[in-house]
Image: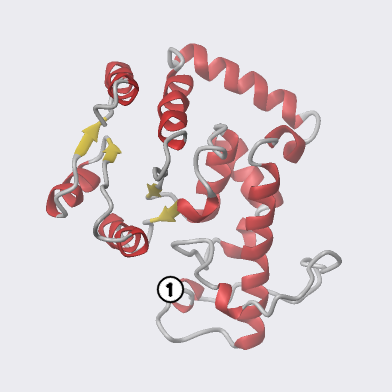
Amino acid sequence: MEEMIFNLADSRLFFNDLEECDQVHIDDVASDDNGQDLSTYNFVTDGFQSPAGAGTLCLGSGVHGGADWMRKLAFRYRRVKEIYNTFKNNVGGLLGSPKREEWLQLRREMEVLTDLWLTQALKALALINSRPNCVNVLVTTTQLIPALSKVLLYGLGSAFPIENIYSATKTGKESCFERVAQRFGRRAVYVVIGDGVEEESVAKKKNMPFWRVSCRPDLEALSHALELDYL
């Protein structure tokens, strides 16, 4: 699956261009986008190249690779957003044949090997999504573009709007949690679900309830708690 994740990221989501210019959020460079129609735009011949050391240029440090370069960067992130939103419920259409069949077979094998872990996770996420005034937010240590590819291939696109996905690769999860809290407000109730030390530590620091999910029974207990409105 990892190979497929990076193949999709490279072939459809511009990861070759964006790997050294990672963003925390899909809209972080949107202010550099002039809104140009991209329907006939040629990304192959537009002269965009990730400059050496671009990772520092694209993290809001105040130093950018020039207005023209930033505009082309923003175009790529806008197209990624369009692709995600178009195919989040039709990943097979994005992959095309024969990749689609390979992906479906891989998904079936993973479900068997993990005792339907993904199905159980989707059940919990769908329960949260079905509630008024409740949303799923993903904070991951994976770079943003591979993270989006991963979400799509695992069939989680319907559970996570692209605007609710944050990459903590370069800033850490605490910074992402802070952004989420600023976005949704201090009065909102946040429940952190995960299995890592970092998110548990940040949740404790910010007085957010933490629900550990490190095995199948944890996931089943989460779904049960959601069904009974304990969460």
Quadrant occupied by the C terminus:
top left
Residue positioned most to the front: 132
> Looking at the rendering, which quadrant does residue 51 occupy?
bottom right
* Left or right: where 136 falls relative to 156: left
Is residue 133 positioned above or below 42 on the image?
A: above
What residue is pinned by disc 1? 59
Number of marks in the rendered image: 1
Q: Position of residue 83 (x, y in %)?
A: 69, 51
Placement of 134 over or under 173, stated as above or below: above
In what element is the residue under mark 1?
A: loop
At a point 28% along the width and 16% down the height, the residue shown is 217
Q: Three-letter amino acid code at disc 1?
A: Leu
Determine whether 128 is above or below 104 in the image: below
Residue 42: horizontal and vertical position, in percent?
Answer: 82, 68
Rendering coords of residue 156 (x, y %): 53, 35
Q: Quadrant of residue 72?
A: bottom right
Q: What is the crowding at mark 1: few (fewer than 14 residues within 10 Å), some, or many (at least 20)? A: some
Residue farthest along the right direction in this orientation: 40
What is the quadrant of residue 77 in the picture? bottom right
